[in-house]
Image: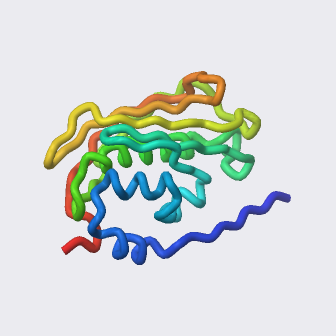
């Protein structure tokens, strides 16, 4: 029997401590380790790889803990990775005190993922920024460069939780 445990930093405390940072500064802080990752990233074993304005990459190493009843990694893990990278790409374009929420995500799955697939890298980029809506795209590839899934996402710009 497998077992997985994890610990995270209180996300409300992190948000309060980083309220003055722009979205890009926040995501870059997660990338360099000066800002702890959100609990979902710890749970799903996502890690930021790179961040620049309008583009981010996160890695993930799927395990048997994410298997579905038909013997492969659940598509929800890949969808969540895509939601993460499209959302974080949007976040890198926003000023301090401004956040976003996903309105819609459309995912195309192109190949199955197994525990032995190895590391996945999700990349997200902004197609069209905006003050009220942002459009982003993303993909997930294996370490060998095989395309696993693609996504398009629409994000609603809104005040960041805890922002005055």
Residue nearest the viewer, comparing 92 with 139: 92
Residue nearest the viewer, comparing 164 with 27: 27
Q: Is residue 46 above or below residue 119?
A: below
Image coordinates of residue 126 in percent, x first then y, are: 30, 36
Q: Is residue 153 above or below residue 161?
A: above
Q: Determine the image quadrant of residue 150.
A: top left
Figure disc tally:
0
* Quarter placement of the N terminus: bottom right
Residue drawn at the location 56% of the way across and 40% of the way down: 75
How is the structure coloured here? rainbow
Image coordinates of residue 159 in percent, x first then y, are: 21, 63
On the picture, is 159 further left or further right than 47? left
On the picture, is 37 further left or further right than 73? left
Q: Determine the image quadrant of residue 104.
A: top left
Residue drawn at the location 30% of the way across and 45% of the way down: 90
Task: Looking at this view, name the residue that lies furthest to the left.
Answer: 131
Q: Determine the image quadrant of residue 56.
A: top left
* Quarter placement of the C terminus: bottom left
Image coordinates of residue 23 in percent, x first then y, are: 31, 54
Image coordinates of residue 46 in percent, x first then y, are: 56, 50
Q: Is residue 151 above or below residue 89?
A: above
Residue drawn at the location 20% of the way across and 58% of the way down: 158
Residue drawn at the location 61% of the way across and 43% of the way down: 74
């Amino acid at each position: 029997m497998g077992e997985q445990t994890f610990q995270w930093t209180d996300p409300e405390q992190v948000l309060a401590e980083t309220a003055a940072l722009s979205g890009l500064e926040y995501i870059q802080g997660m990338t360099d380790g000066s800002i702890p990752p959100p609990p979902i990233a710890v749970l799903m074993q996502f890690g930021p790889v790179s961040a620049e304005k309008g583009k981010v990459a996160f890695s993930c190493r799927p395990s048997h803990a994410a298997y579905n009843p038909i013997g492969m990694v659940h598509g929800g893990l890949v969808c969540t990775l895509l939601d993460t990278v499209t959302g974080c790409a949007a976040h890198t374009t926003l000023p301090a005190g401004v956040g976003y929420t996903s309105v819609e995500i459309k995912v195309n799955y192109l190949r199955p993922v197994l525990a032995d697939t190895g590391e996945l890298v999700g990349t997200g980029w902004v197609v069209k920024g905006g003050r009220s809506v942002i459009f982003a795209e993303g993909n997930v590839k294996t370490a060998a460069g095989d395309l696993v899934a693609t996504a398009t996402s629409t994000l609603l710009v809104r005040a960041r939780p805890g922002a005055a």
